[in-house]
Amino acid sequence: MSVFAQLVERLADLLQPLFHASAAAAAIILFTMLVRLLVHPLSRASARGQNARKQLQPKIAELRRKHSRNPERLQQAVLELHTKEKVSPLAGCLPGLFQLPAFFLLYHLFSSTTIGGEANALLGHDLLGAPLGDRWSDALAGDGVLGGAGLVYVALFLFVAGVAAFNYRRTKRMMADSGGAVALGGGGEQMPGLGAVTKAMPFMSFLTLVTVAVVPLAAALYVVTSTTWSAVERAALYR
């Protein structure tokens, strides 16, 4: 983790002339964008996978007619079709999974008082007066909702709510266009047993609000930046 801390500090030093006291916050946003840029090929592959799944719909419809009285055989036949056509129904999950290590590194980095036996200097950085190592509860316990740190969180919540509303409308539209059968990370036939997850998909973006409220501000910035990137990226790839 000390190597990761040095990377954030180096980025903050480079950005300090532009962002001054908020350079570390800007470094986290830049780091997040670099991570998403590295993951982008997986996102493009996921988009291609969605198109491939859409092309399988006529064959899946035929399997439904053929095995209408045998749900277990239908599920097996659908999985065999995906395997035969080399289409992974879960390919859309990969971009999110590859981002988890970076998120947890940031979480632990700004939750630790010491790094390598020394005081964690990163905890002294802030975003417009809101310490990067603090949480929303700390802002409320300080100057309250309308205090300096509180207003930073209010701005984040409003921004995340806007992105979540955009994702909600877009996901509902995709589900309607595909007849309600939207797989994780794309469209087309949903995996057997994932019906409840599929129904909850339009609301998942709003969970980001909860995440922003409970994690350190540094990790919240990662989540907000990554969520915004995802919204823009998916709007471009899944036109």
Image (cartoon, grey):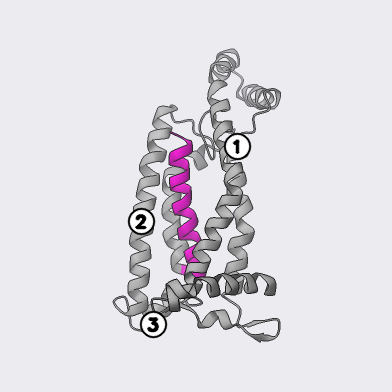
| Image quadrant where residue 94 sits | top right
Q: Nearer the viewer, mark 2 or mark 3?
A: 2
Q: Residues within 10 Å of mark 1 (few under 14, many from 20)?
A: some
Q: Are marks 2 and 3 in contact (CB under 8 Å)?
A: no
Left or right of residue 167: residue 98: right
Say if residue 200 shows up in the picture: no
Q: SS at mark 2?
A: helix
For the point 47% across and 68% down, which residue is it? 26
Residue type, label 1: Ala
Q: Nearer the viewer, mark 2 or mark 1?
A: 1
Which residue has dot 3 on it? Answer: 141
Say if residue 220 shows up in the picture: yes
Quarter holding the N terminus is bottom right
Residues 104 and 137: in front is 104
Q: Earlier in the sequence, mark 2 or mark 3?
A: 3
| Image quadrant where residue 142 sits | bottom left
| Image quadrant where residue 110 sits | bottom right
Q: Where is residue 52 shown, x and y percent of the image?
A: 58, 26
Q: Where is residue 120 shown, x and y percent of the image?
A: 60, 82
Which residue has dot 2 on it? Answer: 161
Residue interval drawn in magenta: 214-239
Residue type, label 3: Ala
For the point 41% across and 60% down, which residue is it? 209
- Label placed on residue 45: 1
Q: Where is residue 6 shown, x and y percent of the image?
A: 64, 74
Magenta: predominant secondary structure element? helix
Q: Residues within 10 Å of mark 3 (few under 14, many from 20)?
A: few
Residue type, label 2: Ala
Quarter holding the C terminus is top left
